[in-house]
Image: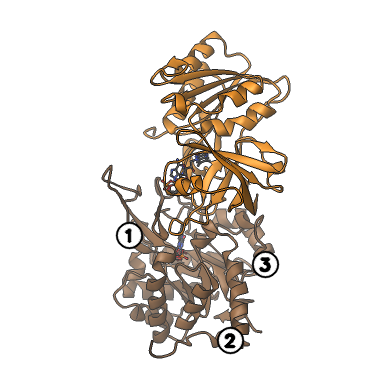
Amino acid sequence: MIERTVQILANERVADQYFRLVLRAPEIAPLVQPGQFAHVRILRLKEALLRRPFSIFQVEGDTFSILYKQVGKGTEVLAQMAPGETLSAIAPLGKGFAVPPPGGETPLLVAGGYGMAAMYLLAKRSPQKGIVFVGGRRQVDILCADDFRELGWEVRIATEDGSLGSKGLVTQPLRAELERTTAGRRLYACGPTPMLRAVGLLAEEFRVPAELSMDEHMCCGVGVCLACVIRVKSGDGWEYQRTCTEGPVFDARQIVWEGQP
Amino acid sequence: MNLSVQLGSLQMQNPVTVASGTFGYGVEYAQLLDLNRLGAVTVKGIRLNPVRGNPTPRTVEVTSGMLNAIGLQGPGVDGFIEKYWPFLRSLNVPTIINIWGTSVEEYAEVARRFDAVEGVGALELNVSCPNIKEGGAQFGTDVNLLRQVVSACRQATRLPLITKLSPNVPNIASFARAAAEAGSDALSVTNSVPAMAIDSETRRPRLANVTGGLTGPCIKPIALKLVWEAARAVRIPIVGMGGIQTATDAIEFLVAGATAVAVGTANFYEPQTAFQVLAGLQEYMERHRMTDVRELTGSLRAGP
Ligand SMILES: Cc1cc2nc3c(=O)[nH]c(=O)nc-3n(C[C@H](O)[C@H](O)[C@H](O)COP(=O)(O)OP(=O)(O)OC[C@H]3O[C@@H](n4cnc5c(N)ncnc54)[C@H](O)[C@@H]3O)c2cc1C
Ligand SMILES: Cc1cc2nc3c(=O)[nH]c(=O)nc-3n(C[C@H](O)[C@H](O)[C@H](O)COP(=O)(O)O)c2cc1C
Ligand code: FES
């Protein structure tokens, strides 16, 4: 974990509301593990003070990139920033995905929307190539499928409106695949919370291990404020753990979901 | 140039500490910051037993600030001593331990427990957390209860006591006096300001706890006035806090009557803030030809 002023090298629209931001960060880039995030301060945002957390998408040489969706105040300003401008980043943060060892499990990745960003480094560093299941509302919500194909991974797409791939939720093709076989497989997921929960349920039903990257609102990003907690099993009960520090990646079996006792 | 200050018998090498709850237990920031450059480390509130805290969402960003209702999640006295004290003890700067309870007896018990721990810098009595159903704020908004809490802690320990006052009172001077008379060595002013935020689309509160505490730059003018009023009422030193993000902010608190300052919410967006404040303070003193930071305390001039 280090804090650095990072320079924007590129900030381009990928599709619709999605942008790819490339940052020069020679000291941060080599430290990044799959599933970790950067906590970014957009200095131009004057009255919205907090940093914004973003998964680290790709790492190349002395740069890392972020794939972000324009959703609110911070990402709107970010989308207007130009190469040469700077941001402050605290990174890499959090506990990421466990990369399977050579000859170990075959990863099945499940992503929704910008959740794809958190998955790329895992796909790149996994010794076994697996399958990526990507879901979204429409065709434009399916991001960077080609980046995964270039790594030699199979990509299976589902859109809710059927504009690309199969029609429906991403958990449907995932279920079909798990029905075929579960042996030697491990699930990894990042996306909206309902999707993560559905993946967690499938993992339980098919008895496959699953690692989920949780999305919670954060303030400090480094474990001091206790804003970002989720309920995690502990002893015969549960305790709050910090998404920024003990997570964002949690073992699906450990998570106590909303509405569960 | 002298930057050192004293809060009772607590010696600080400089007047800049951090606000409880915004700096964890220090260790979390150790990778990013040289903690030994602070005046003191102030840790998150501790009561006797572990506390789970409130459901989420616990925080929400608002214009120039944020709301929180963490609910004082914490490891309890034993958990704190086991997990965090060895690290804090190893620092060269003192630790201020923020404590609370749900009864006068519990406050005193926590104070007694820390009295037996070697090396504690001071205890800060949090009588003003707005996010706890029982205890917390009521001790800070009832002057008689406040007096009882401070006296009970005074009897339980010889450690320096810093009473952290609530902003949510009509007349902070009487609370400041009550704390001083009951044996407090210093005051912290101020805690977060009770507030709420609503999502107009869903018509739901933005915090699971419905209400929370407002902090950050938006509360600075409120906090400054409270420090000024408290400083005129008592002779014990005051730790000023509320929205400090620059040296200028900190100097305003000193001028209003604070002896030391604490950086809170700003840590979340800029962990280096305390050091920036310290550097700016030194630069200001040079520019104004001051040799002792204590010259600033309470130096407010009359008239606009
Ligand atoms: C571990 C992690 C990884 C993430 N990775 C990505 C990513 O790779 N790409 C991407 O586009 N987004 C990602 N997000 C979500 C991203 O943080 C939010 O979209 C962003 O903070 C929105 O900021 P804003 O100012 O545009 O929105 P606003 O709605 O104006 O923000 C207001 C406040 O709410 C917070 N907030 C709003 N939405 C979210 C959210 N979904 N999650 C967390 N905080 C939120 C903001 O940080 C801010 O404090 C990630 C979130 C987490 C926790
Ligand atoms: C997330 C959060 C947690 C806090 N926890 C505590 C606490 O445990 N005990 C306490 O006395 N004050 C607590 N506070 C209040 C701060 O110590 C400080 O008084 C307040 O935030 C005002 O300063 P600021 O505007 O610089 O943040 C907390 C504040 C925040 C934002
Ligand atoms: S964001 Fe502060 S503890 Fe996780």
Q: CA distance from mark 1 to mark 3?
A: 35 Å
Element assignment for label 1: strand
Quadrant that contains the C terminus of chain A: top left
Q: Nearer the viewer, residue A164 or A10?
A: A10
Q: Is residue B261 left or right of residue B4?
A: left
Chain with brown colouring: B
Q: Are marks 1 and 3 on the same chain?
A: yes
Categorize mark 2 by other alpha carbons within 10 Å: few (<14), some (14-19), many (20+).
Answer: few
Residue at left offset 62%, top offset 21%: A149
Q: Is residue A43 left or right of residue B141?
A: right
In the rendered view, would you say B96 is above or below A147?
A: below
What amino acid is found at the position of numbered circle 3 in the picture? Asn
Q: Which residue appears farthest toward the left when viewing the image?
A: B203
Residue at left offset 40%, top offset 21%: A160
Chain A is shown in which shade? orange
Rendered location of residue A25, percent (x, y): 67, 47
In the rendered view, would you say A132 is above or below B52?
A: above
| Figure quadrant of residue A224 | bottom right
Element assignment for label 3: helix
Q: Nearer the viewer, residue B139 or A7?
A: A7
What amino acid is found at the position of numbered circle 2 in the picture? His
Identify the mark nearer the N-term, 1 or 2: 1
Q: Nearer the viewer, residue A104 or A39?
A: A39
Residue identified by numbered label 3: B36
What amino acid is found at the position of numbered circle 1 in the picture? Ala
What number is the disc on residue A16? none
Rendered location of residue B165, percent (x, y): 40, 72
Residue identified by numbered label 1: B195
Rendered location of residue B244, percent (x, y): 49, 69
Residue identified by numbered label 2: B288
